[in-house]
Image (cartoon, grey):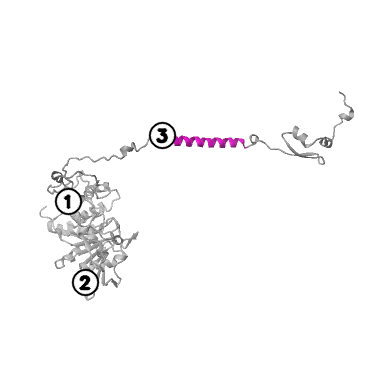
Amino acid sequence: MWMTDEEQRPLAATDIIALLDVDLLSFYLSGLQVESILPQNSYLRSSYHRGLWEGNYLPFMVAAAAAVLACIVVTMVYFYGKRNKPSKKGHPDLDQMCVYPGVKPVVKTTKVIQPDSPKSTPSSSVSASPSPSPAYRGSPKAGKPKGLQERRGSNVSLSIDLPMPPLSADSVKCGTPPKESVVDELLQSGTRKMTRAELRQSILNARALYGEFWEIPMNHPEQVEVPGCGTKNRYKTILPNAHSRVVLPEVDNDILTTYINANYIKGYDMEERAYIATQGPMNHTVTDFWQMVWHERTPIIVMITKLTEKKEKCAHYWPDLEDRYGDIVVSVNRVVEHDGYILRHFTLQRGNEVHHIRHYWCTEWPDHKTPETAKALLALVQEVEFHRLRQPRPRRPVVVHCSAGIGRTGCFIATSIGIRQLRVENMVDVLSIVCGMRQDRGGMVQTNEQYEFIHYALCQFEKTLPSEGVD
């Protein structure tokens, strides 16, 4: 077909656009959404939308979907495995079974005292050949060997309440004594008398002393039968033993007014109420403390603690010059400073009655530790003992306190008794002394380093005695 020149002539864009309409363009240009045709400017106006699969973010969408799917699979596998995992509890019926402890035959040993058996003298801890130590080492940093009581974590033996068949006469004879009686019997029978030479030898083997110390029952009471007394205890685990507790006069029918955390301690040769071991007074128990001093007619107070050692250890319970505590007026008459301690002379007045007291304050003994030397302690112990023995009989108790009333307090009293025993008997039994104190107040002599220091102090005192004629 032949075309004329006019037909072959190119058409202007405006002419072509004029021949088109929106429907026609939408049909042939389906990818474009033609909205209008504007011949004036010779352009088409349209909008174009891509499909989701044509975008640049398609890979990201695929990755996100894969991650979600993986999380779902992992979660399903975890819960499926947990559901099918065998239970650690075992069969439910077996969980309800009660397994009774087997009865073991009674075996006599050198350390455990059997019922109805005569009291024996347990020997001290056996160790290898002693390693010589020329001088006291102070408070060592090495950890202490754990003894029976420490391994248990308590001085209370484990007890299991199980239903028991009716007891017959024969079974009563084979019964286990109560734990209190076992502890009492162990404390009563603990002894190791040493000659002066054996005392000097004992400080050369600290490990043996540590082992001996940790076998001594602590004898801490679990509670005190005085309602509300917890507010008067400096430490909730340090309580007075009931049988030797100091009881104050009752005021206004209030039993709490009778309570103070203090115990009578026997002295040398079982001297009753030779000492009173007590905690450092607190601000709200200062009046109770002076009531005890007045009621007991105490001639001497020994204080072995600073007022503050990182935290408060004892209240400042005495006046600078004069002050009133309840119905008791305390006056300071004289202050004398000695090497290692300060001596104050107090006068107590209640109505027309007057009582004089010597107050010794030792400030060079750190808590839970031991002094570098025993010089100050020995000087203080001997001066206090000198004035105590000058009292007319019956002697009134010497009050000794630190912070808790068991550690440094126990060392002071044990050293006092040991010095008296060395003077009288020319030998000493530190193990028996500590056991006796713990019968009266649980936990007396708090650490194995303190136990070693008592031996060291007594050894230093022994050197001042005349040469032993018989050893």
Tell me how far mark 2 sits from mark 3, CA to CA: 82 Å
Mark 1: amino acid: Glu
Please name the residue that numbered disc 3 is placed on: 84
Mark 3: amino acid: Asn
- Between 398 and 93, the one nearer to me in the picture: 93
> How would you rate the neighbour count of disc 1 (Cα within 10 Å): few for under 14, some for 14-19, many for 20 or more?
some
Residue at position x 50%, y 36% from top?
Answer: 72
Q: Is residue 36 above or below residue 140?
A: above
Residue 242 percent coordinates (x, y): 22, 58
Total marks in image: 3
Residue 387 percent coordinates (x, y): 18, 66
Which residues make up the magenta segment? Answer: 57-83
Q: Which of the labelled discs sits on residue 185, or is there none?
A: 1
Magenta stretch prevailing secondary structure: helix
Is residue 298 among the parts visible in the rendering? Answer: no
Q: Is residue 336 above or below residue 127?
A: below
Please report contact status of discs 2 and 3: CB closer than 8 Å, yes or no. Answer: no
Q: Which residue is situated farthest in the right direction here? A: 5
Residue 361 percent coordinates (x, y): 26, 64
Of helix, strand and loop, which one carries label 3? Answer: helix
Tell me how far mark 2 sits from mark 1, CA to CA: 40 Å
Tell me how far mark 3 sits from mark 1, CA to CA: 56 Å
Residue 147 percent coordinates (x, y): 24, 47
Indicate left or right for 36 with 104 as reference.
Answer: right
Mark positioned earlier in the residue sequence (3 or 1): 3
Q: Which of the labelled discs sits on residue 355, or is there none?
A: 2
Residue 165 is drawn in which quadrant?
A: top left
Q: Is residue 299 above or below residue 177?
A: below
Mark 2: amino acid: His
Is residue 140 among the parts visible in the rendering? Answer: yes
- Between 449 and 231, the one nearer to me in the picture: 231
Q: Nearer the viewer, mark 2 or mark 3?
A: 3
